[in-house]
Amino acid sequence: MTIRQLSIFLENQAGTLQKVLELIKQAHIQIIACTIADTAEYGIFRIICREPDRACRELKEAGVAVAISDVFAVEMSNQPGGAADVVSHFSEAGVGITYMYAFLLDGRGILVFRTNQEELAREVVTRCGLRVLSADDLPL
C-alpha cells in the first residue's frame, strides 16, 4: 500500500545535484517525481523512480548519502481542491503528515506524503476507499 522513495542528502554546493542526476542517468533509471527541500547547509532530494533499490545501490556505491523510506502515493482528483479533499480524510482521523508533494501521472493527480502513523493511515485508505499507487502503477 506504500511505495519506496529515495531521500538523497546533498550539500548546498554547485554541482552536487548534477552529480546525482548523472549517476541516475548512467544507470538508466527514470525519475517519475522529485522534490528538493533545503536548509542553509544541505538539501534533501526526494525521488520516486521505478527501481528504487537499484538506484539506492548505485548511489551508495558512488559515495552518495541516500536512504529509502515508504511513502503513500494517493490518487486525487485533478481538479482544484483535490489535495484538500485527500488530506482532509487523514486530518480528520488524526494522521500527521510529515511532508508531502504532488505530481501528475497519466492525467491523474498523485499526492505523495510521509507519516509516522502508517497503520492509522492504512486504515484511512481502506475506510475511505482511496486508491493508492503501488510500484506496479509506475511507468517503465
Image (tube, rainbow, N blue to C red):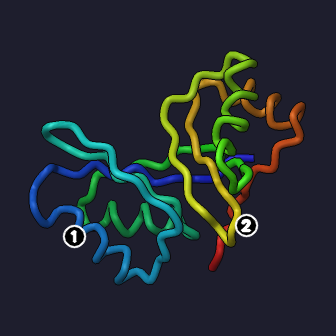
Who is closer to the viewer here, 87 or 127? 87
Sooner in the amino-acid sequence: mark 2 or mark 1 = 1
| Count of numbered labels shown in the rendering | 2
Q: Describe residue 58's horizontal placement relative to residue 11 as left or right.
A: right
| Residue 38 image position (x, y, % from top left) | 25, 42
Label 1 residue SS = helix
Q: CA distance from mark 2 to mark 1?
A: 28 Å
| Residue 112 image position (x, y, % from top left) | 59, 47
Q: Is residue 41 above or below residue 119?
A: below
Asked whether the residues under the numbered discs 2 and 1 touch, taking CB atoms below 8 Å apart as contact, a structural biologist would say no
From the image, tell me which residue sits under label 1. 19
Query: Residue lying furthest left in this view?
Result: 14
What is the quadrant of the C terminus in the image?
Answer: bottom right
The 10 Å Cα crowd at callout 2, few under 14, some 14 to 19, many 20 or more, is few
Who is closer to the viewer here, 22 or 103? 103
Residue at 36 percent across and 80 percent down: it is: 25
From the image, tell me which residue sits under label 2. 137
